[in-house]
Image: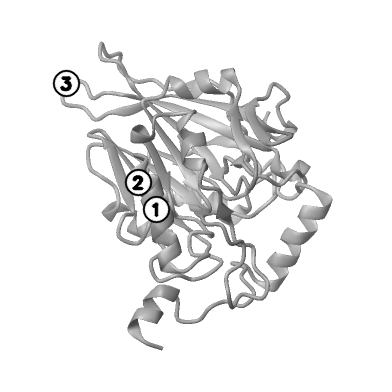
Amino acid sequence: MSGVARRERRTRFLRRIATPYSLLETRGVVRRNRSGVDTLRNAGIVAPLTQDTRFAVPAASVKPLRIGFIGDIMNIADKTLVFGDDLKAFVGECDILIGNFEATIHDHPKRPGVWIGFEQPQAERIVDDLAALFDPTRFYLSLANNHSGDYPLSVFERSNALLRDRGYRLFGMKDDPWIDPDPGVRIVTGTMWSNQRADDMLYLHAPNQSAKYCRPGAVNILYPHWGYELEAWPRPEIVRLATEYARDFDAIVGHHAHNPQQMALVDGKPVAFGLGDFCFYYDLPTYKHGMVCRMEIAPSIEGGAPAIATVDWRQITAEHQPGQLKIEMSNNILPWLK
């Protein structure tokens, strides 16, 4: 294979069966797709954090920075995204919005050479649909997830160019492990999983390496693609990881599970174990719920460091309608989030 062909493929060995998991884990995901979210495994492992949590920080006369987080932006297929007024109001109060862009703008669902795959092609109109929710120039999209390696390099780069041309800020590949959207904030990302182990993927660093990713004197937030799909509660190993990362990071906002998991306190640090899906064309009960999170960052006072002042979260629900997918706030909170 020539160097050009090797670079285009992005991986030495193409996975013919494109799953990031072992056979046993893959069977579990298939089973949960059929039976629904597993609400019993590890139930009660963390205590859910109530909405509108406030932390003791010195009062400041300067307006705090508001950062919003959404979960998995998946394939919308032939649907147009529509947003409820309450969601637009919640997100609209943010200065910055962070999302996990877990698809590649492309019109071919299958990758040649892959026998069984779960590729995520994205409709090109997503660039306009998301812009109807939030200003793209303040909208940061992480590419650190298990689907960013689905397609060859030329397809992936074209997708990224379409997003950048519209104004979106991209990060989360091997050469871009973090973004500094404000002088007092750093957001670091990385993925535990990849369906195709692409050379340019940014894998989640080990907790003992966190210090070299964090920015001294700033609020450091980890935005990891981690955990396991369609489980209501995080597994013990993910809780242990959160405890280790919390030694260096001020907050953790995770994604990947496709359903919302708990917002909790881990050693006094706010941790969202999984925001769930923000949008997905799958019209299945397991893929209709997500969470949006908003943090206020209090500015530094008298030489002190900035700090997280408030954490607020809301559940969202996707309503499938002819030709469109409406994302709106939900008052019917899932039992495991209470």
Whether residues under marks 2 and 1 lie with C-beta atoms below 8 angstroms apart, the answer is: yes
Residue position marked by numbered label 1 in the rendering? 160
Identify the mark nearer the N-term, 3 or 1. Answer: 1
Measured as percent of width and height from the top left, residue 159 is found at 43, 54
Amino acid, disc 1: Asn
Measured as percent of width and height from the top left, residue 58 is found at 30, 17
Q: Quadrant of residue 302?
A: top left
Tally the numbered discs: 3
Measured as percent of width and height from the top left, residue 337 is found at 67, 32
Instruction: Please identify, in this view, whether the residue under mark 3 or under mark 1 is nearer the observer.
Output: 1
Q: Quadrant of residue 259?
A: top right
Measured as percent of width and height from the top left, residue 184 is found at 25, 33
Mark 3 → mark 1, Cα distance in angstroms: 41 Å
Amino acid, disc 2: Arg
Mark 3 → mark 2, Cα distance in angstroms: 38 Å
Crowding at dot 2, Cα within 10 Å, few <14 / some 14-19 / many 20+, comes out as some
Q: Secondary structure at mark 3?
A: loop
Residue position marked by numbered label 2 in the rendering? 164
Residue position marked by numbered label 3 in the rendering? 302
Crowding at dot 1, Cα within 10 Å, few <14 / some 14-19 / many 20+, comes out as some
Q: In the shown orientation, is residue 55 left or right of residue 38?
A: left
Amino acid, disc 3: Glu
* Residue 156 in sight from this viewpoint: yes
Residue 62, placed above or below residue 187? above
* Residue 272 in sight from this viewpoint: no
Q: In the shown orientation, is residue 84 left or right of residue 265?
A: right
Q: Identify the residue at horizontal 61%, vertical 45% (top origin).
A: 76
Identify the mark nearer the N-term, 3 or 2. Answer: 2
Mark 2 → mark 1, Cα distance in angstroms: 6 Å
Seen as rendered, the residue at the extreme bottom is: 1
Q: Secondary structure at mark 2?
A: helix
Q: Quadrant of residue 47?
A: top right
